[in-house]
């Protein structure tokens, strides 16, 4: 159980947490979502005891053991010790902090690595592992201390979809065994694993409820805006021989997940197919499909080009372009923060 | 995508099922080509089970229409779904082709 009562925390005069109260039950899984800077990471650092706060209180029902507060914390970067093997990373705290016998801890660490599916890399160093394996090792390291509360600060933010799935599978096995508080931007992840979702904005708890209440039927305008903002799908095309059926299937799953009508699925698949007919794919394209307050949007990031990719002069395929013009109310080219060229399209409503 | 072609005298019926897109249009074109050289044929494209068409499919349809009509035949598209019809409308194909 975690009882957070009216805590307030500021960084150099800026309110990071503003009178936050929240109660989290034993073995409950709670995801905290919200824009960057909304206070969610600060909140779990306060719960972990890593950040002092100015007023209010945080009470848990955990009995400290050998100076360990019973709270495990996993960050977005795995923070494993690079000079230790994965097995050594797992063994360090139970032996040094809890004073447990080395042989017993080693046996448990091997079982733990088996549980999270990375037993085979127990003797490898963190740098040689995939990002998903490193993050699973970081979770396993936390679990070696038998925490009663596990706090995770954006554990999948630096992971690709496959690695995210690996971490998700590990966390699913922990459900009902401990209290989990998860800070994430991944609403799919939050929906799948959580008993309750808390949406934070400007250092306050703006709205909380079941995954369905928060993601499907948010009441507050800010929550709605955030959820819409998060409704997206990314797909990387690495060559002109991309897997078109797989891309279509991904768009279909995206539309089903957000209960979009068939006409939206058709429009998105058609717009993406026609766009990919018109742009070079040799150097790769990162596609983003999103549902926002503006409607259905598609972004394609390509290597920077001095000439526009979609100028009237450069279009050789009039049929594809006329379909795009028919489908879209906006087709623009610009650059992103990585200085790539980005084609942004917003689809008209009810064209198909 | 499934393509079924039946022929009776000078009438050819092409029944399409599924998606006609960048992946499937070349296969469709291959199956259709032997019938495009027939003189004064009536080719009916039954699209009642066609779920999707993109520019790649429309190109094959246009090519078939041109080949058939150039030899004095008729090219008819039938039973378009609302969604597929809107793509024909958007591209002006509805004005060029005979749609029933």
Image: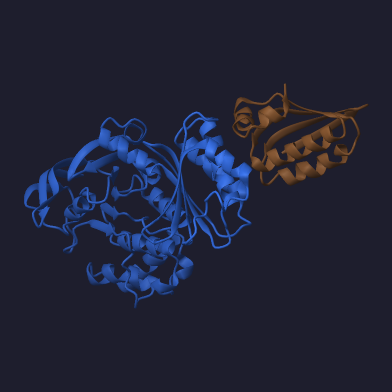
Could you tell me residue B85's position as x and y percent? 63, 28
Residue occupying image coordinates x 61% and y 49%: A244
> Which quarter of the rendering shows the C terminus of chain A?
top right
**Horizontal arrangement in the rendering, residue A185 relative to residue A326 (left or right):** left
Please give left or right for residue B92 compared with residue A48 in the image.
Answer: right
- Residue B99 relative to residue A336: left or right: right
Query: From what the image shows, is residue A54 above or below residue B60?
Result: below
Say which colour chain B has: brown
Pick the front one: A98 or A245: A245
Residue B45 vertical placement versus A175 (above, below): above
User: Can residue B65 be seen?
Assistant: yes
- Please name the colour scheme applied to the rendered image: by chain
Question: Does residue A313 lie above or below A119 as drawn?
Answer: above
Toward the bottom, the furthest residue is A83
Instruction: Tell which residue pokes out farthest to the left in this image.
Output: A55
**Residue A133, placed above or below residue A242:** below
User: Which residue corresponds to the image point at 16% horizontal and 54% vertical from the top-left?
Assistant: A46
Q: Residue at x 32, y 49 (%)?
A: A184
Q: Position of residue B73 (x, y in %)?
A: 86, 29
- Residue furthest to the top in view is B100
- The residue drawn where x is 60% and y is 29% is B86
Point out the image quarter for the N terminus of chain A: top left
- Give the x, y percent position of residue A17: 14, 48
Task: Indicate the quadrant where residue B52 lies.
Answer: top right
In the displayed structure image, the side of residue A321 where residue A9 appears, left or right? left
Supply the letter of whichever chain is blue. A
Q: Quadrant of residue A127?
A: bottom left
């Amino acid at each position: 159980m975690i009882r957070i009562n009216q805590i307030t925390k500021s960084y150099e005069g800026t309110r990071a947490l503003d009178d936050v109260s929240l109660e989290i039950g034993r073995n409950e899984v709670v995801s905290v979502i919200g824009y960057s800077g909304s206070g969610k990471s600060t909140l779990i650092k306060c719960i972990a005891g890593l950040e002092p706060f100015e007023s209010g209180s945080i009470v848990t029902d955990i009995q400290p053991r050998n100076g360990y507060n019973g709270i495990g914390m996993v960050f977005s970067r795995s923070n494993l010790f690079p000079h230790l093997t994965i097995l050594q990373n797992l063994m360090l705290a139970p032996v040094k902090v809890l004073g447990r016998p080395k042989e017993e801890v080693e046996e448990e660490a091997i079982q733990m690595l088996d549980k999270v599916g990375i037993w085979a890399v127990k003797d490898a160093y963190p740098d040689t592992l995939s990002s998903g394996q490193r993050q699973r090792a970081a979770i396993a390291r936390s679990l070696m201390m038998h925490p009663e509360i596990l706090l995770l600060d954006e554990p999948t933010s630096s992971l690709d979809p496959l690695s995210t799935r690996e971490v998700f599978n590990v966390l699913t096995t922990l459900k009902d065994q401990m209290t989990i508080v998860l800070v994430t931007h991944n609403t799919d992840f939050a929906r799948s694993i959580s008993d309750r979702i808390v949406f934070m904005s400007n250092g306050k708890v703006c709205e909380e409820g079941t995954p369905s209440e928060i993601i499907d039927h948010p009441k507050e305008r800010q929550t709605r805006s955030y959820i819409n903002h998060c409704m997206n799908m990314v797909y990387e095309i690495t060559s002109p021989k991309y897997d078109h059926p797989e891309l279509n299937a991904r768009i279909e799953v995206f539309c089903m997940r957000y209960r979009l009508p068939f006409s939206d699925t058709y429009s998105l698949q058609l717009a993406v197919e026609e766009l990919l007919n018109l742009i070079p794919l040799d150097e790769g394209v990162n596609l983003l499909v999103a549902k926002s307050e503006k409607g259905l949007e598609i972004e394609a990031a390509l290597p920077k080009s001095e000439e526009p990719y979609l100028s009237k002069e450069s279009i050789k395929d009039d049929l594809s372009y006329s379909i795009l013009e028919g489908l879209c109310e906006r087709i623009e080219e610009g650059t992103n923060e990585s200085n790539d060229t980005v084609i942004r399209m917003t689809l008209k409503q009810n064209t198909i | 995508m499934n393509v079924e072609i039946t022929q009776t005298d000078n009438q050819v019926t092409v029944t399409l099922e599924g998606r006609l897109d960048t992946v499937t249009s070349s296969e469709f074109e291959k199956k259709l080509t032997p019938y495009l050289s027939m003189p004064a044929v009536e080719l009916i494209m039954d699209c009642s089970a066609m779920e999707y068409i993109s520019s790649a499919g429309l190109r094959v349809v246009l090519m078939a229409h041109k080949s058939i009509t150039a030899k004095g035949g008729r090219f008819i598209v039938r039973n378009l779904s609302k969604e597929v019809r809107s793509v024909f409308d958007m591209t002006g194909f509805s004005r060029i082709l005979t749609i029933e």
